[in-house]
Image (cartoon, rainbow, N blue to C red):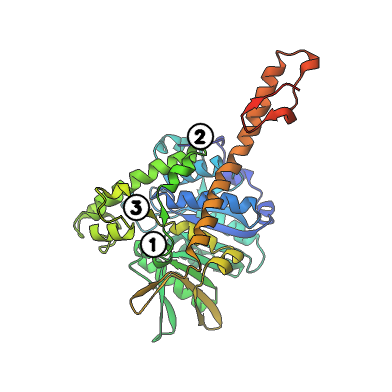
């Protein structure tokens, strides 16, 4: 794991919520099951880029799905490695998975559990919502909807602060009921079906706009897994870790997909996700000796995150819009007469944007470390020079990583 620059601390005691909520960019509270696969970690890298571009102001990150303490530690380490030290992390619900789901993607997390103290995610969310203006905060749910449902149940007085809920899962419109209904086969909805039903029902009753990104949208914009090798060349430890974790996670998923549909070892993997699904889903090249030689990634969480930025939504996506009681609810990625419609305007343009955001996220995160290294190098050299030979930072050759005499 990338080392964290954090020190043991109680997050609730060091974060100024009012100052955080008044930051530049769309205020967003993120809910994630980071660690289940690499997709959430990739989304956090893009989140760091969007914050530096003043497009998104991440107020907090809430982790869900057991083991939540491990996921919280992982989220803290990832955010710190990306320079997002000021974004607090809260512990959410079990995500409907009471038996627990192995945090199988990233190693070395358990050893960090005693380094951090985290507050309850519901307390963190309620405090930021409480200090926000009416209809100003977006909830971004890249996981199951149990934590969103919990806020609906326990803090109904704060729901008018929500501008929109952007969620990853899937939904379809019923002409019979004239309501948007969650796709219960989608993994996130499948984790806690009752929570998914309640959130969609309440959003439509309370006229809270929603944007749902389905798996069909992700399928329409595959990214070659080899791109992870390119990211690793940035030498950011997280980029290397994501590449390695992806290989580990894919092997784990391959194993689950080959189990019988009723095998408990499949955990929450839907029955439709079998061996044939795996090969088709990841677009493994025909004739390949192994799926590991040629497969594609679907950056589901990253695409969901981009829907929080109006400019990206208008440029890159063509969601299906449904008017329910005067409120617009969007769905990106739908099935029409059995045919997948991704809702992606231009796949190549979107992939170019995603690649840029990822590279920029890692590059920007390394700049503070580079500046410290430059300063230290100059200080060490100056100790061995006389006053007339002292170096200035402006004379450092950044490209070669060497210092030149003034």
For marks 3 and 2, give the one nearer the viewer. Answer: 3
Expressed as whole percent of the image width and height from the top left, the position of residue 206 reads 53, 76
Read off the residue under disc 2. Answer: 3
Read off the residue under disc 3. Answer: 295
Number of numbered discs: 3
Expressed as whole percent of the image width and height from the top left, the position of residue 344 reads 48, 67
Q: Which residue appears farthest toward the front when viewing the image?
A: 287
Label 1 sits on a secondary structure element that is helix
**Disc 2/disc 1 C-alpha distance (Å):** 30 Å
Judge whether 353 appears above or below 104 on screen.
below
State which quarter of the image contains the N terminus: top left
The image quadrant of residue 175 is: bottom left
> Mark 2 or mark 1, which has the lower sequence index?
2
Find out whether the residues at labels 2 and 1 contact each other: C-beta distance under 8 Å.
no
**Disc 3/disc 1 C-alpha distance (Å):** 23 Å
Judge whether 182 appears above or below 129 on screen.
below
Q: Residue at x 30, y 58 (%)?
A: 268
**Disc 3/disc 2 C-alpha distance (Å):** 30 Å
Q: Which residue appears farthest toward the bottom when viewing the image?
A: 176
Read off the residue under disc 1. Answer: 188
Closest to the observer: 266 or 207? 266
Closest to the observer: 92 or 23? 23
Label 2 sits on a secondary structure element that is loop
């Amino acid at each position: 794991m990338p080392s964290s620059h954090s020190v043991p601390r109680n997050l609730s005691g060091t974060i100024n919520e009012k100052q955080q909520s008044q930051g530049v960019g769309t205020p967003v509270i993120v809910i994630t099951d980071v660690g289940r696969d690499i997709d959430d970690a990739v989304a956090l890298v893009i989140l760091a880029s969007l914050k530096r571009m003043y497009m998104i102001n991440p107020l907090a990150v809430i982790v869900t799905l057991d083991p939540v303490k491990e996921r919280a530690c992982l989220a803290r380490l990832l955010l710190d490695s990306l320079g997002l030290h000021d974004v607090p992390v809260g512990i959410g619900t079990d995500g409907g998975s009471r038996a627990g789901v192995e945090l199988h993607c990233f190693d070395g997390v358990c050893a960090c559990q005693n380094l951090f103290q985290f507050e309850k995610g519901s307390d963190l969310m309620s405090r930021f919502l409480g200090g926000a203006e009416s209809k100003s905060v977006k909830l971004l749910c890249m996981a199951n909807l149990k934590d969103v449902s919990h806020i609906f149940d326990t803090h109904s007085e704060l729901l008018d602060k929500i501008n929109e809920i952007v969620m990853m899962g899937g939904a379809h419109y019923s002409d019979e009921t004239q309501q948007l209904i969650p796709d219960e086969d989608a993994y996130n909805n499948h984790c806690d079906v009752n929570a998914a039903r309640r959130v969609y029902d309440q959003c439509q009753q309370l006229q809270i706009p929603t944007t749902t990104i389905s798996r069909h949208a992700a399928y329409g914009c595959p990214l070659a897994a080899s791109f992870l090798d390119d990211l690793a060349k940035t030498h950011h430890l997280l980029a290397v870790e994501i590449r390695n974790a992806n290989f580990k996670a894919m092997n784990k998923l391959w194993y689950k997909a080959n189990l019988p549909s009723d095998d408990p070892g499949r955990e929450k993997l839907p029955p439709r996700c079998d061996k044939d699904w795996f090969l088709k889903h990841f677009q493994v090249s025909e004739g390949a000796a192994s799926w590991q030689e040629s497969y594609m990634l679907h950056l589901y969480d990253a695409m969901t995150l981009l829907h929080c930025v109006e400019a990206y939504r208008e440029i890159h996506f063509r969601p299906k819009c449904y008017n329910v009681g005067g409120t617009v609810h969007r769905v990106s990625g739908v099935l029409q007469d059995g045919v997948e419609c991704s809702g992606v305007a231009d796949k190549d343009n979107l992939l170019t944007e995603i690649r840029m955001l990822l590279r920029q996220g890692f590059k920007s995160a390394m700049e503070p470390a580079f500046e410290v290294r430059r300063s230290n190098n100059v200080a060490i050299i100056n100790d061995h020079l006389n006053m007339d030979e002292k170096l200035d930072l402006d004379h450092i050759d950044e490209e070669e990583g060497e210092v030149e005499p003034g």
